Amino acid sequence: MEKEFVDKTISGYLKKIYGFALSKTKNIDLAEELASKITYEVYISLLNVEQIFNVNSYIYKIANNIYNRFLIEEKNESTLLKNEIKNQTNIENQDDVLHAKLLREITYLSKMQREIVVMHYFNKIKLKEIASYLKIPIGTVSWHLREARDQLKHGITEFREVSTDTEKHEIFSDMRILGYSGVSLIESIFYFKFRFSQKIAYLAYHKAKTPQEIAQELSIPAVFVENEINYLLENGFMLKMPCNKYLTNIYIIEQNFKRDERVNDILKKYARIISELYIPSLFTIGKKLFDSMSTNEAIIFTPEFDYNFLMWSIVSYACSKKLNNEELDKELLKYMIKRPDGGKNIAIANIKIKTIKQTTEKNSKFVIKEPDYIPAGTYVSRRQPHLNILKTWLFHSQFDNRTHNNKEFKMSLFETLNDYIKGKLNKSPSNIDSFIPLYEKSLITSTISEDMTLSKEIINIIITNQKEDTFLKMLPNIPKKLKDIGYELDAEMFKVNKEYFPEHIHGLCRVMNQNILKSGQMRIHILNHLLETGMLNHLKKHQKKTVNMILFSDVLP
């Protein structure tokens, strides 16, 4: 075949070849080695043939043959290592059980130990030459060799307990970021797709550990742990410490009911204070905005002319924007990590611990007890970053019945709604695909009239025709007294939370417990307090789909 055609063919198959190698080896390093061998053989073979009727089949056969040869080479290498190590350790038992044990224990050696063992026992290379090749002191080579022999002896002669309890090591219930994602919008959970990846991160969170210590605890080969640690290290989720130890650099919040109870007591106390010092002025502004709806100077729209629904969004929005000390926000920037994907952020993970036991006549099981107040988050989307028109703000909490998946609220959804309000989108069969998402998300919904006979269609979201900057200026600023009280709140929160985080996270913990007045947790307690005191009423079923959501548009319904 012509070289140009072969080059183009190889280029198109590189990812497929690597995928094949990775699926067979389950190891990044081995996959790269196997993929390079396959690519070379395929390239040479294609150059030497005149015509191929099925390229896929042809390349697969070559790949499979190379993989089989690769297995034989790996097996021969392991057998040689077994014999050489047996001579050094005076192990006499040569049955299959010993063979299996030895091969298993080799996988628990660190990458450095495996290299030294292979070079010394395989290739008969002297320790001095190994030290020169690896660029480490000869004493370090001797130490690794001794540690490897001792570990192999111990692993073969002692019983290794393999963990079968899948709940022994905690995994993340969810992940999010504080800061900015890269242009590719990769989320943190992308880097922790596998359970063992999350377990590795958790085991190195409270105390720095070597890959071997983690491998021993998880009962998986050290090579897998090392590969994953290097991957997390490259992406800023781990820190390298002295003595080949690693620490996880993620803000992991472990569920603790005692701490949650103490935190809730603090937040309830300050929710009452905020409700006294700030919320009344919000209701005054809210009433003016509501009254303007019946005039030609209306600047806001609330579905069904519902003042209560309007105030839910006004309260949550104002508390998130106005109860803010911008000076404290700047400290968070110091802890944001620049990621290779272009993002700059703090990675946050939550862990829910199964601690509550339910017992029935037939069996017993552990279940997750949800906290009194679920995690909340704020999401902002906009069409044009340099404009404040057609921008959406929403706050997720336990008071709504949304899925809390921000990907469901794409800006195109609100652009369609905006076009409908402007009369640019009529209800015709050709536009049905545009309207379906609006109904699914209850941005447009139907309600039953008072006589229970007619259904009325409504636009079910708070909308203002003001730019966000203009709208914010209408809302009252934080009183100085409340701002000073905010510092007291932050100090109390840090004092409670500090003891539940490892020492290397204490600095981050301190700044994460600043500006609590504007936090999602605080807003939940404020809304709950207003419900309890009757300042807010409970929501209707269809309102729970779009509560605490504001669309900044250039037109009102």
Image (cartoon, helix red, strand yellow):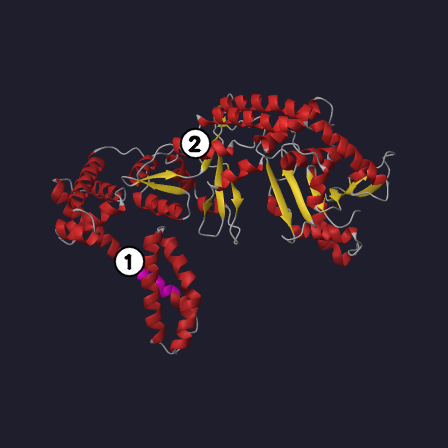
Main SS of the magenta part reads: helix
Examine the structure image and report whether residue 76 is included in the region drawn in magenta: no
Quadrant the N terminus occupies: bottom left
Q: Amino acid at mark 2?
A: His
Q: Position of residue 391 (x, y in %)?
A: 67, 48
Q: Is residue 538 visible?
A: no
Residue 58 versus residue 361 in the image, above or below: below
Q: Position of residue 358 (x, y in %)?
A: 51, 23
Q: Position of residue 119 (x, y in %)?
A: 18, 52
Q: In the rendered image, which residue does mark 2 sit on?
A: 506
Is residue 206 left or right of 435 when viewed as pictured?
Answer: left
Q: Which residue occupies 63% across, 47% down?
A: 381
Q: Which mark is on residue 369?
A: none
Q: Contact, CB < 8 Å: mark 2 with mark 1? A: no
Please tell me whether mark 1 sits on a helix, a strand or a loop: helix
Q: In the rendered image, which residue does mark 1 sit on?
A: 70
First to last magenta residue range: 60-71
Q: Amino acid at mark 1?
A: Phe
Q: Which residue occupies 74% across, 23% down?
A: 534
Residues 391 and 446: in front is: 391
Q: Which residue occupies 73% across, 36% down?
A: 543
Q: Which residue occupies 60% across, 44% down?
A: 406
Crowding near the residue tagged with mark 2, few <14, some 14–19, many ≥20 C-alpha atoms within 10 Å? some
Comes first in the chain, label 2 or label 1: 1
Q: Is residue 495 visible?
A: yes
Is residue 157 left or right of 453 when viewed as pictured?
Answer: left
Is residue 416 left or right of 522 when viewed as pictured?
Answer: right
